[in-house]
């Protein structure tokens, strides 16, 4: 939940075509509450194995909270940006092709450079923050090239 909504000095808002309210200057979240809300989402109720919510969205920066059921997998993703994956609930395993598997318990943090493909496997019900940071010269929300594949 955003507790502050300071948008007057945020020049990036005009460039966001969807969800401009996520591009505020200062945001604060209760991740436990956000996870509870994700469990109420239709995608979670349908049993697809995961639910996610974009918490922050700027042209060059995004934070997504992802909740996954136990023994589910997020198949190959790749971002044209540096990313971090931080576990806030449960335990996940990140598979990086031609690399070793990395297990992340609660409070685990992994960073990947731009364009490195990865899969995420949830070993038990898990939640993690996916943070994506594009170099400004490549950041755009109008192009699928800049977003995660």
Image (cartoon, rainbow, N blue to C red):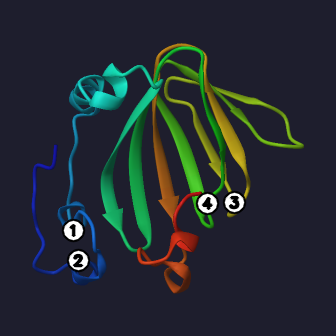
Q: Mark 1 points at which residue?
A: 20
Q: Residue at x 28, y 80 (%)?
A: 12
Mark sitting on residue 79: 4
Q: In which quarter of the image is the N terminus?
A: top left
Q: In which quarter of the image is the C terminus?
A: bottom right
Q: Which residue is drawn at 47% across and 18% down?
A: 69
Question: Which mark lies nearer to you, 3 or 1?
Answer: 1
Q: Earlier in the sequence, mark 1 or mark 2?
A: 2
Estimate the x, y position of residue 141 in percent, counting from the top left: 41, 74
Q: What element does badge 3 sit on?
A: loop
Mark sitting on residue 113: 3
Residue 8's place in the image compared with 88, above or below, is below
Mark sitting on residue 13: 2
Q: In which quarter of the image is residue 76?
A: top right
Mark 4: few, some, or many residues within 10 Å (few <14, many ≥20)? many
Q: In the current view of this chain or complex, which residue is farthest to the right?
A: 98
Q: What element does badge 1 sit on?
A: helix
Q: Earlier in the sequence, mark 3 or mark 4?
A: 4
Question: Which mark lies nearer to you, 3 or 4?
Answer: 4
- Residues marked 4 and 1 touching at CB (< 8 Å): no
């Amino acid at each position: 939940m955003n507790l502050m909504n300071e948008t007057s000095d945020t020049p990036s808002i005009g460039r966001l075509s969807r969800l401009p309210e996520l591009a505020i200057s200062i945001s604060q979240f209760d991740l436990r509450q956000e996870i509870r809300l994700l469990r109420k989402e239709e995608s979670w109720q349908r049993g697809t194995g995961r639910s996610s919510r974009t918490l922050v969205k700027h042209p060059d920066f995004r934070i997504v909270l992802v909740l996954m059921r136990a023994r589910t997998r997020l198949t190959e993703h790749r971002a044209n940006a540096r990313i971090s994956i931080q576990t806030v609930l449960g335990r996940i395993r990140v598979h990086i092709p031609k690399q070793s598997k990395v297990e992340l318990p609660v409070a685990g943090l992994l960073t990947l450079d731009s364009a490195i493909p990865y899969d995420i496997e949830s070993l038990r019900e898990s939640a993690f923050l996916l943070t994506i940071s594009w170099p400004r010269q490549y950041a755009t929300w109008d192009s699928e090239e800049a977003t995660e594949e």
